[in-house]
Each structure stands twice: as C-alpha cells, then as structure tokens.
Amino acid sequence: MEGEGKVKFGKNKAEDSIQESFSGGFVSLLREHELDAPRITEAGYRTAFIHPNDRWYRLWISFVLLWCIYSVIFTPLEFGFFRGLPAPFTAIDGVISAIFIVDILLRFFVSYRDARTQRMVYSRSSIALRYMKGGFILDLLGCLPWDSLYKSTGRNEILRYLLWIRLYRLKRIKAFFKQMEKDIRINYLSARIAKLVSVQLYSVHTAACIIYYLATTMPPEEEDYTWIGSLKLGDYSYVDFRDIEFFKRYVTSLYFISITMATIGYGDIHAVNTREMAFSHTTEKFREEMTNLTQYIKRHNLGHEITNQIKSHLRLQYECNPSRKAFLDGIPETVKARLYQYLYFEIVQEVPLFKGCSEKFLNQIVMKLKEDFFLPGEVVLEQGAVVDHIYIISHGLLEEVLTGENRAEKPISELEPYDLFGEVAALCNIRQPYTVRACKLCRLLLIEKQCLSSILQLYVEDSSQILSNLNEGREANPGKKQLVSNISYLISKREAELAMGVRSAAHHGDTKHLKDLIDAGADPNQTDFDGRTTLHIAASRGYDDVVMLLIQQNVNVNCIDRFGNSPLLEAVKAGHDEVANLLKANGANLNLEDAGTYLCKLAVENKVDILRRMLEHGVDPNCKNFDHRTPLHVAAAEGLHLVAAVFIEFGADVFAADRWGNTPFDEGHRCGSKLLMDILKHARKAKCSG
C-alpha cells in the first residue's frame, strides 16, 4: 500500500507538472495573441481601426462582391453594345462608383497581419502605405465616371477603352473562389467546378462583346461587310443590326463566339472582314479543314479506321501546332533564325550523327527543320516506301519493324530521343528497309533530303566529320555502309566543285566569293593538273587583295608548279610590282632552279622588260647555262644590243668565258653589230679602267 501511494503520488506530481507546463504554454500563447490587439488608452480610439475578421466588415465585403460581379459582367457589355449609357444604367453606374469609393475609404482603416511577424498591424501610416502600394490606383481609376467623361469629350473612342480598368475587380472574385475552395463546409470538387464554369462562361461573354464591337467600328456604309451585318438566319436579316433589340444582338454574338470557340457549327455565321478573321482565325481554320475533310471522306467512301486516323492526326496537329506556319511567315528571317536556334539547336547538337560538327553547320540544319507529331500506333515510314525526309526524334518512342512473309513482323530496334532515321533511304536513294511506327506520342523534326545534301556539299569539313561518325558505328550497323559510300561521293564531288570555284574566284579577283568558299571548307593550297595553286593564279592576274587574303590563310608562298614557276615569278613576269613586293615581304622567292637557262631563253626571245624585272628582284646576271654561257653571251651572239645593255647595266661580265673559251665580246665581234660592239667596248673599257 505504501508503495502504491508513492507511485500514485509520483503520478499525480507528473500530471501536475504536465498540466502546469500546458497551462504556462497556453498563457504564453494568449499573451502572444494579446500583442495582436491594439494597445489603446484613449476612449473611442479603438473604433479608428477595422479588424479584417469583423462581422460587419465581412458583410460589407460580401455586399461589395455582389457589385464586383455586376461590374465585371456589365463592363464588356458597356464596351461592346453601348455608345453612351441610357439614363437608368447611368444612375446605376453612379451608385456603383459611390459604393466603391466608400470601400476605398474603408480600406485605409482595415488592419492587416504582417507576413513576417504574423502580428496584426494597427499603424495608420503602415496601413495607408500598404494600400497605396497595392491596388489603390486601379481601384480609384475604376471609380471614375468613364461614361460621363466619354460624353463630355465629344464621345472620344479612346476613353471607352479605359473601361477595361474595372476588370481589376476580378481580383476580388478570384479571392472569393480561393476562399470557397478552402472552406471545409463546401465540397472542394463542387467549388472547382463552379470556378471553371464561371471562367468559361465569362470568357464566352467577353469574347461575344468584343466580336460585336468589331462589327460596330466599321463605317456605316460598310457595316453590311461584317459578320453580323451580312448575317441571314432563315428569313431574318441583320442588315440594320443596330436597330435590333439588345437581347437579340447579344444572344447572336454569344452563338457566334460559342460555335467558333467550340469549332462546331454549320457555316451559318462566319468571320467576314480581316479583323474578324484575325479574332477567330485558328478555330475557324480548323473547322473549315475538318468540314473539307468530312466531305472528302464521304465522297471517297473511306473506311472507318482510316477516317479515325486522319481525323485524329488533324486534331493532334491543331492542338500541338495550330498556327505555327502563319506565325513564322510573319516574322523576319533573322528573328526566325534565333527562334529556330532556341527551339531546336540543343536537340540537333545531341544527334550522334552530328557530333563534333561546327556551329555554322548545325545552324544551317536547324533553319531547314520542320515539326510534326504522331500518335501511338501511327506509321511514320512504311517499309519499301520512297523517303524524301530525314527524321530526328525530339520526344517520344518509336520502333523499327521488319515485315516479312505473311505480314509477320520482326522487331529490329527502338528509337529514342536524339536518334535519326530515314537517312539511309533518303541519301542513298533506296527504299525504306524497315517500317517505323510510333509507340508513344512523338514529336519529330524533319529535314528534306535535298536540303541536307546541299548543306553537306557546302560544309566539306563537317561532312568529313559526319563520315567519321558513320564509320565509328558502321560495325554496329552494317546497313550504313552504302551511306558511307554516298557521303564520301558527296564530299569528293563538293571538294572538286570548291576547287573549281576557288580557282574561278581567284581568276576574276572576287575576294568575297573566295573567302566564302574558304569558310565553307575549300583548300586554297589545292593544286590543279599543272600543279598551279590559287596563289599562282592571283599573282599572275595581279589581284593584290586576293593575294593578301591567301597569305592570311597561311598558304605556301613558295609553291612551284609543273613548269618550275613560283607565285613571285608569275607576278614578276606579268609586271605586277605591288603583288611581287607583297609576296617578297611575306617570304616569297623566285626559286629558279636553272636561272642561266631561263635568262638565256628570255634573252633569245628579246623580252627586255621581263629581264629587267627579274634582275631587279635579285637574279644573278652572270648565271650560266649548261654550256657555261651567260645571258650576255646569247644577247651578243644574236646582236640584241638592248638586251645586252640591260645585262651590262646590272653588272654582267663581258670577259666571262663559256666552255669553248669565248667571251661576249668575241660573240659580238662575230655578229658584226656596230651598236652592240660600241656597248661591249664601253663596258670592257669601264671594266679595265675600274
């Protein structure tokens, strides 16, 4: 008993401790909430603030909410159907404005809970500042008598657009639905349905008012060229639609906008002018396409299965991409390029076939892409079909299936995002080897095979990279051997075309075209069948800007063609001094293997100008041919006194002996030319005296 007493005593003591702790916590909680109450000492000062949960204030909020609903419903009606309110509505408008002005004044006295401290704020300045930063301006603008201002300013149409400021009051209706969803006394599903239905009905109501307004903005003489002015329902005509009663016009507008938004109807009401078409273009276009499709199906008596597939695909295109083409056709190419790059560049970059390719090449691919969607079970490519496009998988999953005898199918592989298919059949001009079918909803990017072939031919280096990528996976996919061969052919063909283009651009001095070709992968060092490079051609033609571009591309300035000519020699022979100086400044040499024979040949041909330029660029005038004869020997033997004078001017030796011991003076004496002998005697005398 004594033990039990001790245990009981201990238990009571523990319970007392817990109760004391709980009581202390509860008191602390009460004290914390006491901080929310205004600490007021002056009598009557408590009434200077309104608690947001005050019963009377909640009733006022509900009262204002009713007028908010009226205001947001009536505002589109006033904008669309009234050019100045009738007297009864003007009075109601004034009453509503007065109610909302009172509400604005009251909100300067409504306390609020601080989001950071979770305490009620009763500071008048804080309350006013918070409201002023919030919706005060829009609330005040919504209370202005816009209809009276419209009438007093000579019915200025711009003022009527300011009516839409009142739709800011939708914020209160939204808050009401949000509170209703949180109220556990109301079924959540019912609250959500009520909200969604309200939004849908209000959207239809607003759109109906706007579509009617579009008809009223046409000049009076053109009002029959509107959706309602040209409307005939049965025997009833809407030619003078302004004189028809308001309710009938409103219901007609609701009917038009409902069938337009729902893409149903029978074509009895449709958009007529451009603005109406722009307002209802997308759904109207889809409805027309579906109507045409239905007529086509009936005319050709198509089966139920293929009919459902066609309609499903059309609906999928509409839902996923309703107006892409119309939108893209209206924007500049530069903006379109940036848009395509944003949408597709990262996808193309991840395609294994394009790994390591340049950004310029990928941008060209991206610019040519089109987008398509496929439902599960839909065949993208049929086995044995002729393929005109290459497909890149953006999203979804597809399967490759081989169809054998008796329509038996054998799975080949699955295709996932970033995989490519159709490229072998398209680029190699063979039939599609497998059937490709969508397993999930797929988004595919398409590029025409001609576009891809053109891009591959333009970017030779990237084509080589693609060839390398193909070779890496060729063992895993033997079916791509032919694709490797075809791309190799495209590369060699393009290299030949680029080489011809480079030589043509150098021949005509087209620096810009030459630079574009080099940027596209052309090799400026490539030689023709005579071993001549682009620099040979440019130097012989005297295009210093082309020569400078080639030097900047680090071409070989001392390359020799099949005839032993260097670019500098070509420039010197042609008399292009600026080009010759430019080449010499960048390390070019004449590189004459047998200068004696070459100069002797020029001497026999009496090419004085070329000889002078050659000697000016450092060729030795005493160089000898295989018989140890100098060019002066040849000039003296032929009696070419002008040629001899040039060589003597540049220091040719008149006493040089050939392998038979003859000097130029001996050759001149045999020739018997008096002018030549005078030149040689003068040179010998100068040599002896020197």
Image: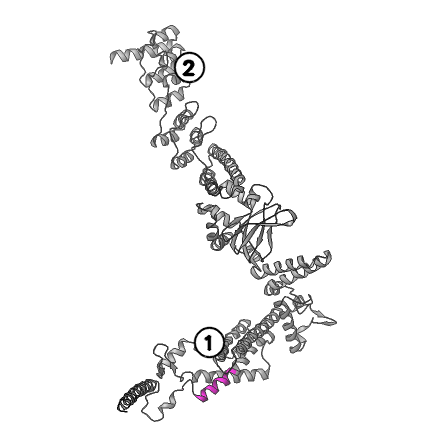
- State the residue at coordinates (40%, 77%): 132
Residue 415 coordinates in the image, percent (x, y)? 52, 52
Mark 2 nearby-residue class (10 Å; few <14, some 14–19, many ≥20)? some
Q: Given contact means CB atoms under 8 Å apart, are the residues at marks 1 and 2 in contact?
A: no
130 or 300, which lies in front?
300
279 or 474, which lies in front?
474
The image quarter containing residue 534 is: top left
Quadrant in the picture for the C terminus: top left
What range is drawn magenta here?
Answer: 50-65
Residue on which the image places disc 1: 138
What secondary structure is found at the residue carrying circle 2? helix
Vertical side of 396 occupied by 122: above or below: below
Residue 561 coordinates in the image, percent (x, y)? 43, 25
User: Marks 1 and 2, how far apart in space?
Assistant: 101 Å
Residue 133 coordinates in the image, percent (x, y)? 40, 75
The image quarter containing residue 39 is: bottom left
* Precedes in sequence: disc 1 or disc 2: 1
The image quarter containing residue 290 is: bottom right
Residue 604: assigned label: 2
Q: Amino acid at mark 2?
A: Val
Q: Is residue 684 left or right of residue 568?
A: left
Q: Amino acid at mark 1?
A: Leu
Residue 684 coordinates in the image, percent (x, y)? 30, 11
User: Nearer the viewer's eye, disc 1 or disc 2?
Assistant: 1
> Is any part of residue 442 visible from this angle?
yes
270 or 118, which lies in front?
118
- State the residue at coordinates (58%, 78%): 84
Mark 1 nearby-residue class (10 Å; few <14, some 14–19, many ≥20)? some
388 or 540, which lies in front?
388
What secondary structure is found at the residue carrying circle 1? helix
